Amino acid sequence: MYSAAFIYQPGQYDDEFHRLNAIIDSVARSLPGFLGVESWQSADGDRRNATYYWSDLDTLKLFSAHPVHQEAKRQYARWYKGYHIVVSEVVRSYGDGSLAHITPNDRQHA
């Protein structure tokens, strides 16, 4: 399992941003290796994160290479003050079982 965390500082969004963002989200969700997404923002709203989870690296690469995703990447400076992406392989996920999450809960390590 892999995750791709898109950490960003929002700027001004316009109609083109919302159009591309809706398509990108739809593309991600349509891919067979898409497992889910979760988002958060800092208390002041200055920094945000959208983490997408994928069953395999090939699907993540397919998503990243999609033409609409590439178009949005070319225009990112119109809508974001900055961004950082972290791609990670999930090697373990655990907790007490009371909080549902996209990743499997390895209770033996809780």
Image: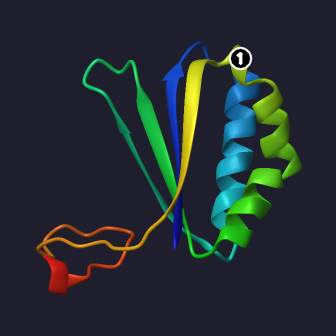
Q: Residue visible at 56% across and 14% down?
A: 11
Residue 5, image x and y in percent? 50, 47
Q: In which quarter of the image is residue 99?
A: bottom left
Question: Which quarter of the figure is the C terminus placed in?
Answer: bottom left
- Farthest right residue in view: 67
Q: In which quarter of the image is residue 79?
A: top right
Q: Nearer the viewer, residue 91 or 103?
A: 91
Neighbourhood count class around disc 1 (C-alpha, 10 Å): few under 14, some 14–19, many 20 upward: some
Disc count in the image?
1
Q: What residue type is labelled 1?
A: Ala
Q: Is residue 27 above or below residue 106?
A: above
Q: Residue visible at 82% across and 28% down?
A: 74
Circle 1 SS class: helix
Q: Is residue 13 above or below residue 2?
A: above
Residue that mark 1 sits on: 77
Residue 57, image x and y in percent? 66, 69
Residue 78, image x and y in percent? 72, 15
Q: Residue visible at 44% across and 68% down?
A: 90
Relative side of 32 to 16, left or right? left
Relative side of 76 to 101, left or right? right
Q: Is residue 66 above or below residue 46?
A: below
Q: Quadrant of residue 46?
A: top left
